[in-house]
């Protein structure tokens, strides 16, 4: 299967999950709102969201897949099954122990990520309770990650991409079971627990259908094969999770500004869409092919795969990033302003979304460039760069946050600026290292394609800006509905970009047919 076809499978299922996720967030944000309870709920989601993005969205699998695939090819089915089973037992034991310790020490753990509101005992106690309930999601996602890696190695992407849908299906009913904000947050936290159990169960069933029989029963052993997996997986997971760690850092600083966590969370829901739909999907799709090319010393094949992956990622990401920059407040307002989430909250969240938006291409490129290192079993270099970006984000974010607050501005906006700058530094380091080592140099066709995609994006941006200037007229044609007007503008922007991309040559019908046929 081609990169485009694998990406289409991954993105299609991820799109369904993200649409449900948007429905989930619209309902929950409307019930919980922005403020102390909203901040406590955002805190309780930090660990589940981090683990979901690290594990379920490919970061752990990116480190596990090359080792598993190489063992499968070199030593056979049974040897690969044994590696997966032993690795799963060690992973389960480790994450279960961390979960138990977190339950005990949660009041002190949250001082690191919610310390700014520790002087509000009632709100802080709520955050501790909610996070204790959501914390077991770590163990479930660890199991799901390894099982996804087994499926992805066989280029079976449907279940691993579709399993996150269960999280949204579990959380949506939580918005209706309690009348109060506190009750809704508690119900949603419980839903997180059961969603993790369901996701792990479905993937377990999928792996057994591939006739890979793995058992959790047995004492965990650090065999040589497991040590090798962990040696790659630990730095690889850190490397692929730099953006998510930066989000945790930003949220921790935001706890010193009441409401800021809720505003950042709403912005996060929108700018994560292209990252999940494009960056994660392309990264997962190209890794098996890059791993095979690396084992066969096929540098030409590796470069073609990277060119195809980056070209596809940028053709889909640039227009999304531009739209988020042009209409950040409008989009936040349309999706989230209802119930307890006010227009003033949308305006604050929109400021953060604008600055996250110009970092979106970097967030996506990190997901596409890092697999080139993982495929060659080099996980330490991306890890160093990820930690460098975390350091930059922490220092710059803290500096901007407190400087802007001292000058009477919203300090959390500085956190969004720092996160995007850190992502671009990470991207530049990854790209320069690949070129310096001779592992990858962009082809002329890729460079031309990105320039053409940028031109098509400029055309779309001008059209969207014009429509926003005439929003009242458009709204009058659709029953005075702001939501319908937004849908119309988004659809029109997509159609305009598609035509502009075809006219500029950024997308060619012959390439689409050839990619999907392979």
Image (tube, rainbow, N blue to C red):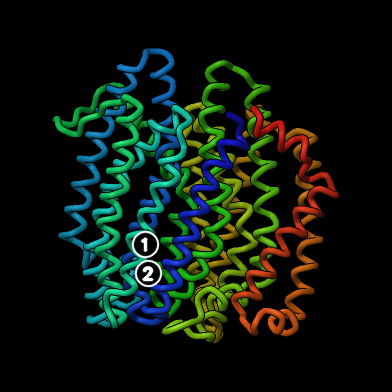
- Would residue 167 be found to the left or right of residue 391 on screen? left
Image location (x, y in percent) of residue 57? 44, 46
Q: Can residue 305 be seen in this snapshot?
A: yes
Q: Nearer the viewer, residue 503 or 327?
A: 503
Residue under the image location 26 percent in, 50 percent down: 197
Query: What residue is shown with label 1?
Result: 46
Residue 217: image quadrant is top left
Q: Secondary structure at mark 1?
A: helix
Q: Quadrant of the C terminus?
A: top right
Image location (x, y in percent) of residue 251? 42, 67
Residue under the image location 79 percent in, 67 percent down: 463
Residue under the image location 41 percent in, 73 percent down: 27
Q: Nearer the viewer, residue 337 or 138?
A: 337
Q: Is residue 259 above or below residue 213?
A: below
- Would residue 149 be found to the left or right of residue 276 on screen? left
Q: Nearer the viewer, residue 93 or 119?
A: 93
Residue 46: image quadrant is bottom left
Query: What residue is shown with label 2?
Result: 42
Q: Is there a contact, CB below 8 Å, between mark 1 and mark 2?
A: yes
């Amino acid at each position: 299967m081609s990169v485009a076809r694998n990406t289409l499978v991954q993105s299609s299922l991820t799109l369904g999950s993200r649409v449900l996720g948007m429905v989930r967030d619209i309902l929950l944000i409307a019930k919980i709102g922005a403020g102390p309870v909203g901040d406590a709920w955002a805190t309780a989601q930090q660990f589940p969201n981090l683990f979901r993005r690290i594990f379920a969205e490919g970061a752990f699998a990116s480190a596990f897949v090359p080792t598993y695939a190489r063992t499968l090819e070199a030593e056979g089915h049974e040897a690969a099954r044994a590696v997966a089973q032993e690795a799963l037992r060690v992973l389960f034991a480790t994450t279960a122990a961390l979960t138990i310790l977190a339950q005990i020490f949660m009041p002190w753990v949250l001082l690191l990520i919610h310390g700014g509101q520790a002087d509000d005992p009632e709100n802080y106690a709520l955050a501790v309770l909610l996070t204790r309930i959501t914390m077991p999601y770590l163990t479930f996602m660890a199991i799901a990650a390894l099982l996804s890696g087994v499926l992805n190695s066989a280029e079976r992407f449907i279940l691993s991409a579709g399993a996150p849908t269960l999280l949204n299906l579990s959380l949506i009913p939580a918005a209706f079971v309690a009348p109060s904000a506190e009750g809704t947050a508690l119900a949603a936290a419980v839903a997180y627990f059961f969603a993790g159990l369901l996701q792990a169960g479905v993937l377990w069933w999928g792996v057994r259908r591939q006739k890979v029989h793995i058992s959790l029963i047995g004492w965990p052993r650090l065999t040589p094969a497991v040590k090798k997996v962990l040696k790659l997986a630990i730095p690889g997971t850190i490397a692929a999770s730099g953006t998510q760690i930066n989000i945790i850092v930003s949220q921790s600083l935001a706890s010193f500004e009441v409401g800021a966590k809720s505003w950042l969370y709403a912005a996060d829901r929108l700018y994560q869409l292209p990252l999940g739909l494009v960056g994660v999907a392309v990264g997962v799709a190209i890794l098996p092919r890059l791993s095979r090319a690396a084992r066969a010393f096929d540098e030409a094949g590796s470069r073609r795969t990277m060119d195809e992956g980056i070209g596809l990622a940028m053709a889909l990401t640039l227009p999304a990033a531009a739209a988020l920059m042009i209409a950040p407040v409008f989009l936040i307002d349309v999706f989230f302003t209802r119930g307890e989430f006010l227009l003033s909250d949308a305006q604050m969240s929109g400021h953060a979304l604008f600055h996250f938006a110009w970092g979106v291409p970097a967030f996506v490129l990190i997901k596409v460039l890092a697999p080139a290192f993982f495929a060659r079993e080099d996980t330490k270099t991306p890890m160093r760069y990820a930690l460098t970006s975390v350091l930059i984000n922490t220092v710059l974010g803290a500096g901007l946050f407190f400087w802007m607050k001292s000058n009477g501005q919203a300090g959390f906006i500085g956190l969004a600026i720092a996160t995007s700058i850190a992502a671009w530094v990470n991207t530049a380091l990854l790209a320069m290292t690949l070129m310096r080592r001779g592992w990858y140099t962009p082809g002329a066709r890729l460079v031309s394609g990105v320039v053409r995609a940028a031109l098509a994006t400029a055309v779309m941006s001008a059209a969207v800006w014009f429509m926003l200037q005439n929003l009242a007229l458009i709204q009058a044609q659709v029953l005075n509905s702001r939501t319908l007007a937004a849908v119309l503008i988004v659809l029109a922007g997509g159609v305009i970009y598609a035509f502009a991309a075809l006219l500029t040559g950024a997308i060619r019908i012959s390439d689409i047919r050839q990619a999907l046929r392979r």
